Image (cartoon, grey):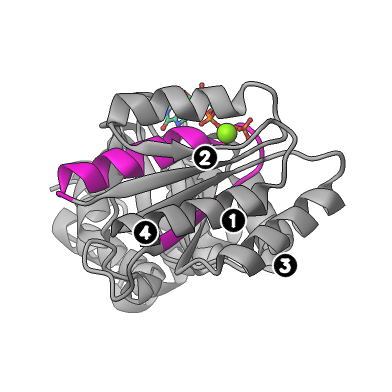
Amino acid sequence: MFDNLKKKFSGLFSKSSEEFVRKSDLESKIIETLVESDVSIDVAERIWKSMEESLDIDGKKIPVEKYVTALRNAIIPIFDVQKSLPDILNPHEKPYVMLFLGINGTGKTTTVAKVANYLRKNGKRVVVAASDTFRAGAIEQISILGERVGVAVIKHQGGSDPSAVAFDAINHARARNIDYVLIDSAGRMQTNKNLIEEMKKIKRISKPNLTVVVLDAMIGQDAVNQAETFFSEVGFDCIIVTKLDTDAKGGSILTMAAEIKKPILFVGNGQELNDIQQFTKEWFLDRILPQ
Ligand SMILES: Nc1nc2c(ncn2[C@@H]2O[C@H](COP(=O)(O)OP(=O)(O)OP(=O)(O)O)[C@@H](O)[C@H]2O)c(=O)[nH]1
Ligand SMILES: [Mg+2]
Protein backbone atom coordinates (compact mmCIF):
# COMPACT_ATOMS: atom_id res chain seq x y z
CA MET A 1 0.00 0.00 0.00
CA PHE A 2 1.17 3.51 -0.86
CA ASP A 3 4.45 2.26 -2.32
CA ASN A 4 3.96 4.47 -5.36
CA LEU A 5 3.45 7.55 -3.30
CA LYS A 6 6.50 6.81 -1.18
CA LYS A 7 8.63 6.18 -4.26
CA LYS A 8 7.51 9.48 -5.78
CA PHE A 9 8.25 11.45 -2.62
CA SER A 10 11.60 9.74 -2.23
CA GLY A 11 12.44 10.69 -5.82
CA LEU A 12 11.41 14.25 -5.18
CA PHE A 13 13.59 14.71 -2.15
CA SER A 14 16.77 12.96 -3.09
CA LYS A 15 20.18 14.43 -2.30
CA SER A 16 20.09 16.26 -5.61
CA SER A 17 17.04 18.20 -4.47
CA GLU A 18 19.32 20.00 -2.04
CA GLU A 19 20.66 21.85 -5.07
CA PHE A 20 17.21 22.36 -6.36
CA VAL A 21 16.25 25.63 -4.83
CA ARG A 22 14.49 27.75 -7.40
CA LYS A 23 11.10 28.26 -5.89
CA SER A 24 9.11 28.06 -9.11
CA ASP A 25 10.88 24.81 -10.08
CA LEU A 26 10.21 23.28 -6.69
CA GLU A 27 6.59 24.39 -6.76
CA SER A 28 5.87 22.78 -10.12
CA LYS A 29 7.76 19.61 -9.18
CA ILE A 30 5.88 19.15 -5.94
CA ILE A 31 2.47 19.93 -7.37
CA GLU A 32 3.13 17.68 -10.36
CA THR A 33 4.19 14.80 -8.11
CA LEU A 34 1.12 15.15 -5.92
CA VAL A 35 -1.28 15.39 -8.83
CA GLU A 36 0.31 12.37 -10.53
CA SER A 37 -0.39 10.49 -7.31
CA ASP A 38 -4.12 11.31 -7.43
CA VAL A 39 -4.05 14.33 -5.16
CA SER A 40 -6.47 16.97 -6.48
CA ILE A 41 -4.98 20.23 -7.76
CA ASP A 42 -6.66 22.18 -4.97
CA VAL A 43 -5.22 20.00 -2.25
CA ALA A 44 -1.80 19.88 -3.93
CA GLU A 45 -1.73 23.67 -4.03
CA ARG A 46 -2.75 23.86 -0.42
CA ILE A 47 0.09 21.52 0.54
CA TRP A 48 2.57 23.56 -1.50
CA LYS A 49 1.44 26.84 0.09
CA SER A 50 2.01 25.44 3.53
CA MET A 51 5.48 24.13 2.56
CA GLU A 52 6.37 27.45 1.02
CA GLU A 53 5.48 29.25 4.23
CA SER A 54 7.57 26.99 6.39
CA LEU A 55 10.66 26.80 4.15
CA ASP A 56 12.99 29.65 3.37
CA ILE A 57 13.45 28.58 -0.19
CA ASP A 58 14.89 31.05 -2.62
CA GLY A 59 18.58 30.92 -3.28
CA LYS A 60 19.42 28.54 -0.46
CA LYS A 61 20.43 24.95 -0.10
CA ILE A 62 17.84 23.12 1.88
CA PRO A 63 18.64 19.73 3.37
CA VAL A 64 16.41 16.86 2.38
CA GLU A 65 15.16 16.38 5.95
CA LYS A 66 13.77 19.91 5.96
CA TYR A 67 11.75 19.27 2.84
CA VAL A 68 10.34 16.09 4.30
CA THR A 69 9.45 17.80 7.58
CA ALA A 70 7.76 20.64 5.71
CA LEU A 71 5.74 18.16 3.68
CA ARG A 72 4.79 16.24 6.80
CA ASN A 73 3.71 19.44 8.54
CA ALA A 74 1.70 20.44 5.49
CA ILE A 75 -0.18 17.14 5.46
CA ILE A 76 -0.86 16.76 9.20
CA PRO A 77 -3.65 19.40 9.44
CA ILE A 78 -5.56 17.62 6.67
CA PHE A 79 -6.12 14.82 9.16
CA ASP A 80 -7.28 17.01 12.05
CA VAL A 81 -10.72 15.68 11.29
CA GLN A 82 -9.57 12.26 12.58
CA LYS A 83 -10.04 13.61 16.09
CA SER A 84 -13.81 13.27 15.74
CA LEU A 85 -13.54 9.52 15.20
CA PRO A 86 -15.25 7.46 17.89
CA ASP A 87 -13.44 4.61 19.60
CA ILE A 88 -15.52 1.85 18.10
CA LEU A 89 -14.03 -0.85 20.32
CA ASN A 90 -15.30 0.98 23.41
CA PRO A 91 -18.73 2.30 22.49
CA HIS A 92 -21.12 3.83 24.98
CA GLU A 93 -24.17 2.16 23.48
CA LYS A 94 -25.21 -1.44 23.23
CA PRO A 95 -25.95 -2.59 20.68
CA TYR A 96 -23.75 -0.20 18.73
CA VAL A 97 -25.38 0.11 15.32
CA MET A 98 -23.23 0.76 12.27
CA LEU A 99 -24.88 1.47 8.92
CA PHE A 100 -22.76 0.95 5.80
CA LEU A 101 -23.65 2.96 2.70
CA GLY A 102 -21.97 3.15 -0.69
CA ILE A 103 -22.50 3.12 -4.44
CA ASN A 104 -22.63 -0.35 -5.96
CA GLY A 105 -19.34 -2.19 -6.15
CA THR A 106 -17.35 0.03 -3.80
CA GLY A 107 -16.92 -2.86 -1.37
CA LYS A 108 -19.68 -2.42 1.22
CA THR A 109 -20.51 -6.08 1.73
CA THR A 110 -16.86 -7.14 1.84
CA THR A 111 -16.16 -4.32 4.30
CA VAL A 112 -19.08 -5.32 6.55
CA ALA A 113 -17.57 -8.81 6.73
CA LYS A 114 -14.09 -7.43 7.40
CA VAL A 115 -15.34 -5.16 10.19
CA ALA A 116 -17.37 -8.01 11.68
CA ASN A 117 -14.23 -10.13 11.64
CA TYR A 118 -12.17 -7.32 13.21
CA LEU A 119 -14.73 -6.91 16.01
CA ARG A 120 -14.91 -10.67 16.56
CA LYS A 121 -11.13 -10.86 16.85
CA ASN A 122 -11.42 -8.20 19.54
CA GLY A 123 -13.78 -10.37 21.51
CA LYS A 124 -17.00 -8.60 20.50
CA ARG A 125 -20.35 -10.13 19.64
CA VAL A 126 -21.73 -9.09 16.27
CA VAL A 127 -24.85 -9.56 14.18
CA VAL A 128 -25.19 -8.51 10.55
CA ALA A 129 -28.35 -7.23 8.81
CA ALA A 130 -28.64 -8.32 5.18
CA SER A 131 -30.35 -5.09 4.17
CA ASP A 132 -29.35 -5.24 0.52
CA THR A 133 -32.57 -6.91 -0.54
CA PHE A 134 -32.42 -5.33 -4.00
CA ARG A 135 -29.54 -6.99 -5.82
CA ALA A 136 -30.00 -10.67 -6.66
CA GLY A 137 -27.31 -12.66 -4.87
CA ALA A 138 -26.62 -10.02 -2.22
CA ILE A 139 -28.31 -11.94 0.60
CA GLU A 140 -26.44 -15.10 -0.29
CA GLN A 141 -23.13 -13.22 -0.50
CA ILE A 142 -23.42 -11.73 2.98
CA SER A 143 -24.72 -15.04 4.39
CA ILE A 144 -21.64 -16.88 3.16
CA LEU A 145 -19.35 -14.17 4.51
CA GLY A 146 -21.19 -14.21 7.85
CA GLU A 147 -20.66 -17.94 8.11
CA ARG A 148 -16.94 -17.54 7.41
CA VAL A 149 -16.62 -14.89 10.10
CA GLY A 150 -18.84 -16.80 12.52
CA VAL A 151 -21.57 -14.19 13.01
CA ALA A 152 -25.32 -14.48 12.57
CA VAL A 153 -26.84 -12.79 9.53
CA ILE A 154 -30.45 -11.60 9.84
CA LYS A 155 -32.19 -11.84 6.49
CA HIS A 156 -35.59 -11.66 4.86
CA GLN A 157 -36.74 -12.58 1.35
CA GLY A 158 -35.19 -10.82 -1.62
CA GLY A 159 -37.16 -7.69 -2.47
CA SER A 160 -38.37 -7.16 1.10
CA ASP A 161 -38.05 -3.92 3.07
CA PRO A 162 -34.36 -3.25 3.98
CA SER A 163 -35.37 -1.20 7.01
CA ALA A 164 -37.41 -4.08 8.42
CA VAL A 165 -34.35 -6.33 8.19
CA ALA A 166 -32.25 -3.76 10.05
CA PHE A 167 -34.97 -3.39 12.68
CA ASP A 168 -35.09 -7.17 13.20
CA ALA A 169 -31.32 -7.37 13.53
CA ILE A 170 -31.34 -4.65 16.19
CA ASN A 171 -34.07 -6.49 18.14
CA HIS A 172 -32.11 -9.72 17.76
CA ALA A 173 -29.05 -8.00 19.24
CA ARG A 174 -31.05 -6.48 22.12
CA ALA A 175 -32.59 -9.84 23.02
CA ARG A 176 -29.22 -11.61 23.01
CA ASN A 177 -27.00 -8.96 24.51
CA ILE A 178 -25.02 -8.63 21.29
CA ASP A 179 -22.56 -5.73 21.10
CA TYR A 180 -22.77 -4.63 17.47
CA VAL A 181 -25.22 -4.56 14.60
CA LEU A 182 -23.63 -4.05 11.17
CA ILE A 183 -26.11 -3.14 8.45
CA ASP A 184 -25.17 -3.92 4.85
CA SER A 185 -27.19 -1.96 2.29
CA ALA A 186 -27.91 -1.79 -1.42
CA GLY A 187 -25.69 0.30 -3.69
CA ARG A 188 -28.22 0.49 -6.45
CA MET A 189 -31.96 0.96 -6.77
CA GLN A 190 -34.26 1.67 -9.71
CA THR A 191 -33.04 5.28 -9.66
CA ASN A 192 -30.55 7.32 -7.64
CA LYS A 193 -33.46 9.19 -6.09
CA ASN A 194 -34.89 5.90 -4.87
CA LEU A 195 -31.49 4.97 -3.52
CA ILE A 196 -31.23 8.20 -1.53
CA GLU A 197 -34.76 7.78 -0.19
CA GLU A 198 -34.03 4.18 0.76
CA MET A 199 -30.86 5.19 2.58
CA LYS A 200 -32.70 7.94 4.44
CA LYS A 201 -35.42 5.51 5.47
CA ILE A 202 -33.05 2.85 6.72
CA LYS A 203 -31.20 5.52 8.66
CA ARG A 204 -34.38 6.92 10.15
CA ILE A 205 -35.55 3.51 11.28
CA SER A 206 -32.28 1.96 12.45
CA LYS A 207 -30.98 5.16 14.12
CA PRO A 208 -27.36 4.12 13.65
CA ASN A 209 -24.71 5.20 16.13
CA LEU A 210 -22.32 5.45 13.20
CA THR A 211 -23.10 5.90 9.51
CA VAL A 212 -20.16 4.84 7.39
CA VAL A 213 -19.77 5.62 3.69
CA VAL A 214 -17.62 3.12 1.80
CA LEU A 215 -15.60 4.72 -1.00
CA ASP A 216 -13.47 3.10 -3.68
CA ALA A 217 -9.94 4.56 -3.87
CA MET A 218 -9.71 3.61 -7.54
CA ILE A 219 -12.24 6.22 -8.59
CA GLY A 220 -10.44 9.12 -6.87
CA GLN A 221 -12.17 12.43 -7.39
CA ASP A 222 -15.48 10.74 -8.23
CA ALA A 223 -15.52 9.30 -4.72
CA VAL A 224 -15.22 12.82 -3.32
CA ASN A 225 -18.09 13.94 -5.52
CA GLN A 226 -20.24 11.01 -4.40
CA ALA A 227 -19.65 11.87 -0.77
CA GLU A 228 -20.25 15.58 -1.23
CA THR A 229 -23.45 15.33 -3.22
CA PHE A 230 -25.12 12.00 -2.77
CA PHE A 231 -24.21 10.98 0.75
CA SER A 232 -24.19 14.42 2.32
CA GLU A 233 -27.91 14.43 1.62
CA VAL A 234 -28.30 11.30 3.73
CA GLY A 235 -25.76 12.38 6.33
CA PHE A 236 -22.79 10.30 7.48
CA ASP A 237 -20.10 10.27 10.16
CA CYS A 238 -17.01 8.73 8.64
CA ILE A 239 -15.62 6.94 5.60
CA ILE A 240 -13.86 3.69 4.80
CA VAL A 241 -11.64 3.73 1.73
CA THR A 242 -11.33 0.39 -0.08
CA LYS A 243 -9.09 -1.14 -2.74
CA LEU A 244 -5.88 0.57 -1.73
CA ASP A 245 -4.07 -2.61 -2.76
CA THR A 246 -4.98 -1.97 -6.39
CA ASP A 247 -3.25 0.54 -8.59
CA ALA A 248 -4.92 3.34 -6.66
CA LYS A 249 -2.07 5.78 -6.18
CA GLY A 250 -2.66 6.62 -2.54
CA GLY A 251 -2.97 10.35 -3.00
CA SER A 252 -6.72 9.93 -3.21
CA ILE A 253 -6.65 9.40 0.58
CA LEU A 254 -5.31 12.93 0.97
CA THR A 255 -7.92 14.34 -1.37
CA MET A 256 -10.74 12.51 0.38
CA ALA A 257 -9.67 13.61 3.85
CA ALA A 258 -9.12 17.22 2.76
CA GLU A 259 -12.29 17.61 0.74
CA ILE A 260 -14.85 15.36 2.39
CA LYS A 261 -13.73 16.50 5.85
CA LYS A 262 -14.89 13.32 7.54
CA PRO A 263 -12.59 10.98 9.43
CA ILE A 264 -11.34 7.77 7.87
CA LEU A 265 -12.26 4.80 10.05
CA PHE A 266 -10.53 2.01 8.16
CA VAL A 267 -8.84 1.37 4.85
CA GLY A 268 -9.34 -1.83 2.86
CA ASN A 269 -6.37 -3.39 1.12
CA GLY A 270 -7.51 -6.66 -0.40
CA GLN A 271 -10.32 -9.13 -0.86
CA GLU A 272 -9.66 -11.25 2.23
CA LEU A 273 -11.25 -10.82 5.65
CA ASN A 274 -8.04 -9.62 7.27
CA ASP A 275 -7.32 -7.03 4.60
CA ILE A 276 -8.46 -4.10 6.67
CA GLN A 277 -6.43 -1.58 8.60
CA GLN A 278 -7.39 1.06 11.12
CA PHE A 279 -6.44 4.46 9.81
CA THR A 280 -4.32 6.94 11.74
CA LYS A 281 -2.35 9.86 10.36
CA GLU A 282 0.90 8.55 11.86
CA TRP A 283 0.40 5.19 10.18
CA PHE A 284 -0.29 6.89 6.85
CA LEU A 285 2.57 9.41 7.06
CA ASP A 286 5.06 6.68 7.96
CA ARG A 287 4.05 4.86 4.82
CA ILE A 288 4.22 7.74 2.37
CA LEU A 289 7.15 9.86 3.53
CA PRO A 290 10.79 9.01 3.02
CA GLN A 291 12.45 8.28 6.37
N1 LIG B 1 -8.68 -5.53 -4.31
C1 LIG B 1 -9.68 -5.24 -3.48
N2 LIG B 1 -10.92 -5.63 -3.79
C2 LIG B 1 -11.91 -5.32 -2.95
C3 LIG B 1 -11.70 -4.61 -1.74
N3 LIG B 1 -12.88 -4.47 -1.13
C4 LIG B 1 -13.81 -5.06 -1.92
N4 LIG B 1 -13.23 -5.57 -3.02
C5 LIG B 1 -13.85 -6.29 -4.15
O1 LIG B 1 -14.77 -5.43 -4.80
C6 LIG B 1 -15.82 -6.18 -5.35
C7 LIG B 1 -17.15 -5.61 -4.88
O2 LIG B 1 -17.24 -5.81 -3.47
P1 LIG B 1 -18.61 -5.87 -2.69
O3 LIG B 1 -18.27 -5.94 -1.26
O4 LIG B 1 -19.51 -6.89 -3.24
O5 LIG B 1 -19.16 -4.42 -3.05
P2 LIG B 1 -20.58 -3.78 -2.69
O6 LIG B 1 -20.36 -2.34 -2.47
O7 LIG B 1 -21.22 -4.54 -1.61
O8 LIG B 1 -21.37 -3.99 -4.06
P3 LIG B 1 -22.97 -3.99 -4.27
O9 LIG B 1 -23.56 -4.89 -3.26
O10 LIG B 1 -23.15 -4.44 -5.68
O11 LIG B 1 -23.40 -2.56 -4.09
C8 LIG B 1 -15.61 -7.63 -4.89
O12 LIG B 1 -14.99 -8.33 -5.92
C9 LIG B 1 -14.66 -7.48 -3.71
O13 LIG B 1 -13.84 -8.60 -3.51
C10 LIG B 1 -10.34 -4.21 -1.43
O14 LIG B 1 -10.03 -3.57 -0.41
N5 LIG B 1 -9.39 -4.56 -2.34
MG1 LIG C 1 -23.04 -5.44 -1.44
Q: CA distance from mark 3 to mark 2?
A: 19 Å
Q: N-terminal of the two: label 3 or label 4?
A: 4
Cβ–Cβ under 8 Å for marks 1 and 4: no
Q: Find residue 209 and report its image quarter.
A: bottom left
Q: Residue 175, labelled with which disc?
A: 4
**Left or right position of 211 against 85:** right
Q: CA distance from mark 1 to mark 3?
A: 25 Å
Q: N-terminal of the two: label 1 or label 4?
A: 1
* Residue plotted at (72% across, 67% down): 233
Three-letter code, disc 3: Glu
Q: N-terminal of the two: label 1 or label 3?
A: 1
Q: CA distance from mark 3 to mark 4?
A: 33 Å
Can see residue 254?
no
Residue at numbered disc 1? 41
Q: Position of residue 273 (x, y in %)?
A: 31, 29
* Closer to the camera in the image, 1 or 55: 1
**Left or right position of 68 against 151:** left
- Segment colored magenta: 97-123
Q: Position of residue 182 (x, y in %)?
A: 44, 50
Q: N-terminal of the two: label 3 or label 2?
A: 2
Q: CA distance from mark 1 to mark 2?
A: 28 Å
Closer to the eye: label 1 or 3: 3
Q: Position of residue 270 (x, y in %)?
A: 36, 27
* Closer to the camera in the image, 237 or 24: 237
